[in-house]
Image: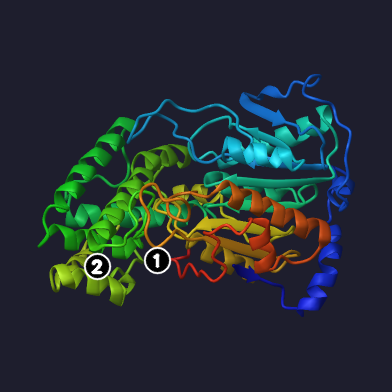
Amino acid sequence: MVALRRPAALLAAVVTAAALLASCSGSDDGDTAKNETKNRTLSFTSCDKAKCSGELDGAAYLVRMPDTWNGTLLLYSHGYREAQPSPPDFAPVETNAVVASTPDTADALLDAGFALAGSAYGKNGWAVQDGVKAGEDLHKWFRDHIAEPDRVYVWGDSLGGLITEMLAEKHPEWIAGVAPMCGVLGGLNLNLDIALDLQYAVKTLLYPEMKLTGFASHDEAVKTWQEAQKRIMAATKDAKNGIPKLLAIAAVTDGPTKTRRFDGSTSTSKVSALVESALTGLGYATFGRYEVEQRVGGNPSTNESSTYASRVTAAERTLANAVAPGALDKAVAALDAGKKIAADPAARAAADKLGKPTGNLQDPTITLHTAYDPLVLVQNETVFAERVGAAKGRKADLVQLYTQPPATYAAPAPYGAGHCNFTVDERVGLIRSLDEWVRSGVYPSSAAVGEAMKGAKGYSPLFNPGPWPGNASG
């Protein structure tokens, strides 16, 4: 567990935590209810009488109520959903509302007495503004039709983690606790820049004619990804030239060496994990990029300040040299010598408005991230912690939790490796930890978090995600 505290003595922080929660200024829009710290049973309009599913301004919503309500509403924001069917499976576009990450998680939280609410968004894709509006609309609907909650906690996965944090920054007057999971907390530009690094590396080393930005259509972006997949898979069959290039691509983008399918316990498994991580990231970088560029009117990404040689670690060089001595350094030198990409300033400014947390926390915040995440790098947590530490108007603290997988495992990984790959106990433990912190004002210790997670095997209180792999000014 990584914890960020205000510069005050531990005892003073514990004593004043409840007062700080109460001091968050706000309107009369739920402020009294937000500051209620007792866990009591509340009366409410049941879903037999209220319309607990439907649409609000074109976005589907869903509410589920426990038999006995503890007074807390959990407002959930789902993760990124493709705007159009995309690789690898071209699944139909989702527009349904969900109230938790998984059905089992929802059932466990209902059993614990929490009210659950979740909404789809007006549009799919990088829908941060749509997601914030959906959360606002659903909160109002709940108050108008179900009951006034004592507390509202916002939480969400992936893009929903970013939406969660943006909601919290906008509405401290009615939000009492915040729990982003595997969230894109570094913001859009920073993450799309590292995606450009990945594209650029694949183009330079494996796919010279690859288009990087300005796709004419979703189909063109998909075809680019498909051809990149072919080039990458061909490289895995060339130990002398191909695999060192793949290792170079992974080194400059910090691709995870474990995934849901590969435990990285052998050299073959590690390379397979790096390939899977690269292909996962390339989806975000191609057809995901196309959707973002349509929103912001151009290319918001740049790698002009990237110095790729500085990103290679000794361990990465040792691994590559065991395959082909010197090949990785040659590949990285080619990256540094290549023609870099400039961003469209207007598009970059517009992209900044699609989610860039300030870190100016007003309510207790606990994040949860897998140690090996191929899509939303765990180092997003490092960037977020740095912003929280620098925030001048911050009134609340941050706790960052991580889960790690076993040393070896058969696919799929049980936890800790893969995007948002958490167990039910980990997700429920996150909410239990946040709830105890908000209601008691006592900062959660590692032991308390472990107890809340029922001793979840993946919980790793000493894990450190390390620095962002690229330029962290995005």
Using the image, determine if residue 27 lies above or below residue 323. Answer: above
* Residue on which disc 2 sits: 336
Instruction: Determine crowd level at label 1: few under 14, some 14-19, many 20+ residues with C-alpha closer than 10 A.
Output: some
Which residue is nearer to you in this view: 262 or 154?
A: 262
What is the three-letter code of the residue carrying label 1? Pro
Quarter of the rendering occupied by the N terminus: bottom right
* Residue on which disc 1 sits: 469
Q: Position of residue 230 (x, y in %)?
A: 18, 43
Using the image, determine if residue 109 lies above or below residue 313. Answer: above
What is the three-letter code of the residue carrying label 2? Asp
Seen at 56% across and 49% down, the residue is: 355
Please identify the quarter of the rendering in which residue 341 is found. Answer: bottom left
User: Dot 1: what SS?
Assistant: loop
Seen at 65% across and 28% down, the residue is: 61
User: Dot 2: what SS?
Assistant: helix
Would you say residue 169 is visible in this rendering?
A: no
The nearer-to-camera label among 1 and 2 is 1
